[in-house]
Image (tube, rainbow, N blue to C red):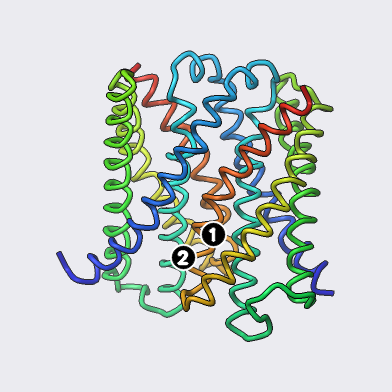
């Protein structure tokens, strides 16, 4: 029956992804004192995780289509470099724009401008990590014969949760 | 700048920007829940997996509906057809059962690291928020997929980003409601 097939197919991949995201939660909770002493840090978590998750899954989906179409193959690097360039740029522009938005908000409510810097620096740290990991994941899952459309999307968003939390904690600890 | 790069940047940035603005909403709910995270050990650990789970369920439902709409096996209106009801029930079922197992697994990892947690309250929060968010997200996904299809947009490109972002806000709000309900 369709119902049980859908449930059974989704269940294990959902569980696997949840296990990856648990480490993002554990990391956040082990830094709870730090994250709650300063305001605005928890506020940034969904924004950072979502941008990197979206950039990672767009890149993963585009690379998997290109791999299926055969436009990325041995010796042909153009399509690969084009996607890497476009998504790195998107990611950097997004972090610059959201940091600017946060800066304006901080100025309006009288908060410290340092928080906008924390966001910008964690974006700068995160961008190469996300681009590299989703490229590797797309190439690896294609080589393994897994359908990248079903596997890479959920796995990349979970992975980005962990990477995002790492970079936020790191940049906050450096700056604040 | 080359034309193809410009077009791709324009498309991805407009979606990303909309999503990021909405994320500031989820961020303020998290910021408002600060004290609850301190009072209930384990709560912050289960937030990312629960949020992630719901985003994935919404995405998968959206993508299955998109395929069915493209194939013509589903018409873009609410009906009792099994194609629609079966898909909706599957995602509701996954939302409740998934949330409970996800919380159990996260707490197992947490426990194996020697950290404390409050099992009963976290299971209650998982079940209640799973039910609430499951109903809201399933309904919203169907609505978005139908509207996108009627307007001639590709549901596959629209529902994914919209549902992960809307899923974040809905899930975090439902977790907060469940926490308040537990006391």
Secondary structure at numbered mark 2 = helix
Q: Chain of mark 2?
A: A
Q: Are marks 2 and 1 in contact (CB under 8 Å)?
A: yes
Pointer 1 local density, CA inside 10 Å: few below 14, some 14–19, many at least 20: many
Q: Nearer the viewer, residue A105 or B130?
A: A105
Residue A143 in percent (x, y) is at: 51, 67
The residue located at (66%, 32%) in the rendering is B176
Q: Quadrant of residue B138?
A: bottom right
The residue located at (55%, 27%) in the rendering is A28
Say which residue label 1 marks. A152
Residue furthest to the bottom in view is B72
- Left or right relative to A38: residue B63: right
Residue B44 in percent (x, y) is at: 63, 28
- Left or right relative to A91: residue B81: right
The residue located at (46%, 65%) in the rendering is A61
**Residue A5 visible to an observer of this rendering:** yes
Q: Chain of mark 1?
A: A
Say which residue label 2 marks. A61
Residue A19 in percent (x, y) is at: 66, 42
Using the rendered image, report if marks 2 and 1 lie on a common chain.
yes
Residue A92 in percent (x, y) is at: 28, 46
Image vertical order of residue B135 relative to residue B148, above or below: above
Q: Nearer the viewer, residue B16 or B107?
A: B16
For the C terminus of chain A, the image quarter is top left
The residue located at (63%, 42%) in the rendering is B171
Looking at the image, is mark 2 or mark 1 earlier in the sequence? 2
Q: Which mark is residue A10?
A: none
Image vertical order of residue A124 relative to residue B119, above or below: below
Distance from Cα at disc 2 to Cα at disc 1: 8 Å
Pointer 2 local density, CA inside 10 Å: few below 14, some 14–19, many at least 20: some
């Amino acid at each position: 029956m369709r119902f049980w097939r859908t449930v059974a197919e989704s269940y294990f991949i959902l569980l696997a992804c949840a296990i990856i995201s648990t480490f993002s939660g554990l990391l956040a909770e082990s830094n709870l004192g730090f994250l709650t002493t300063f305001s605005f840090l928890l506020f940034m978590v969904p924004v950072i995780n979502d941008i990197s998750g979206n950039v990672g899954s767009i890149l993963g989906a585009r690379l998997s289509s290109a791999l299926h179409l055969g436009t990325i193959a041995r010796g042909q690097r153009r399509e690969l470099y084009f996607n890497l360039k476009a998504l790195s740029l998107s990611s950097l522009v997004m972090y610059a724009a959201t940091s600017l938005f946060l800066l304006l908000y901080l100025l309006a409510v009288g908060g410290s401008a340092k928080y906008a810097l924390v966001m910008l620096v964690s974006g700068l740290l995160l961008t190469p990590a996300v681009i590299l990991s989703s490229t590797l994941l797309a190439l690896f899952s294609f080589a393994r014969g897994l359908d990248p459309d079903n596997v890479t999307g959920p796995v990349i968003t979970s992975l980005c949760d962990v990477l995002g939390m790492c970079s936020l904690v790191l940049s906050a600890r450096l700056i604040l | 700048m080359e034309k193809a790069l410009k077009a791709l940047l324009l498309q991805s940035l407009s979606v990303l920007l909309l999503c990021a603005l909405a994320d500031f909403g989820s961020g303020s709910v998290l910021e408002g829940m600060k004290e609850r995270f301190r009072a209930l050990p384990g709560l912050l650990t289960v937030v990312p997996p629960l949020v992630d789970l719901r985003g994935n369920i919404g995405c998968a439902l959206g993508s299955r509906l998109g395929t069915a709409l493209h194939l013509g096996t589903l018409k873009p209106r609410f009906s009792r057809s099994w194609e629609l009801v079966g898909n909706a029930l599957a995602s509701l079922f996954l939302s409740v059962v998934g949330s409970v197992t996800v919380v159990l697994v996260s707490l197992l990892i947490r426990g194996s690291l020697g950290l404390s947690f409050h099992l009963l309250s976290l299971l209650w929060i998982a079940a209640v928020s799973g039910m609430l968010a499951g109903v809201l997200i399933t309904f919203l996904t169907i609505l978005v997929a139908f509207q996108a299809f009627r307007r001639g947009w590709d549901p596959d490109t629209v529902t994914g980003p919209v549902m992960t972002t809307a899923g974040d806000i809905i899930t975090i709000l439902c977790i907060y409601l469940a926490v308040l309900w537990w006391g």
